[in-house]
Image (cartoon, rainbow, N blue to C red):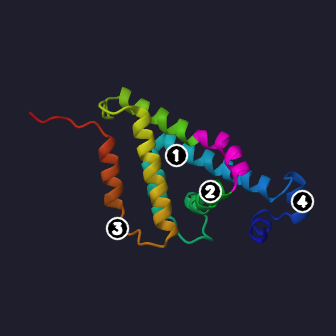
Amino acid sequence: MRRLEEATGLSRGAIFHHFRDKESLFLALAEDEALRMADVVARQGLVQVMRDLLAAPGPDAEHPADWLGTRLEVSRRLRTDPEFRNRWAERSRQLTDATRQRLARQREAGNLRDDVDIDVLTSFLELVLEGLVSHLAMGLPADDLEPVLDLVEETVRRHRRSS
């Protein structure tokens, strides 16, 4: 709350004038982050979101990949809070929908493999994202993961046969 007060210049009372409680405030923040992520997915794909997470500077820096903290808290609440899980399900579809739409556009352009259903590829990419978030949350090294993301990206691309 202190960081939010400093960032917005608003008092705690002014912030809670707009939000019923911390839960509502967090949901609004998480929804905003999900929209920003969906925008990146629509333009550049879900692997770019993962690359942004790897490139994230320290927690106090201004960077789109401040998403990691939000994703970690969402993951924790999804495991422990059934009410939050239900409320979040409505909001989390944005990222999945953006990923599916991006993959469909890539398939239409001939850039995406056509031997795997788009829903399967979407699930694959979302699982990789969750694995990356867990990896980063555990404090494991991230400096050698760019080639891993290259491999992930290559697995969904259409392979052109050489003659």
Q: Name the mark on residue 14.
A: 4
Circle 1 sits in a helix, a strand or a loop, which is it? Answer: helix
Q: Position of residue 94 (x, y in %)?
A: 59, 39
Membership of 103 in magenta stretch: no
Residue at the image position 55 percent from the left and 59 percent from the top: 65
Residue 11 is at least partly visible in this image: no
**Mark 1 lies on residue:** 40
**Mark 2 lies on residue:** 79
* Disc nearest the viewer among 1 and 3: 3
Query: What is the C-alpha distance between the residues marked 4 and 1?
Result: 31 Å
63 left or right of 105 in image: right
Q: Quadrant location of the C terminus?
A: top left
Amino acid type at mark 4:
Ala
**Mark 3 lies on residue:** 144
Q: Position of residue 89 (x, y in %)?
A: 64, 42
Amino acid type at mark 1:
Val
55 left or right of 24 in image: left
Q: Position of residue 54 (x, y in %)?
A: 45, 63
Residue at the image position 51 percent from the left and 65 percent from the top: 56
Amino acid type at mark 2:
Arg
Taking 97 as reference, is 15 above or below it? below
Of residue 47 and residue 92, the one placed in the foreground of this image is 92
Residue at the image position 70 percent from the left and 54 percent from the top: 29
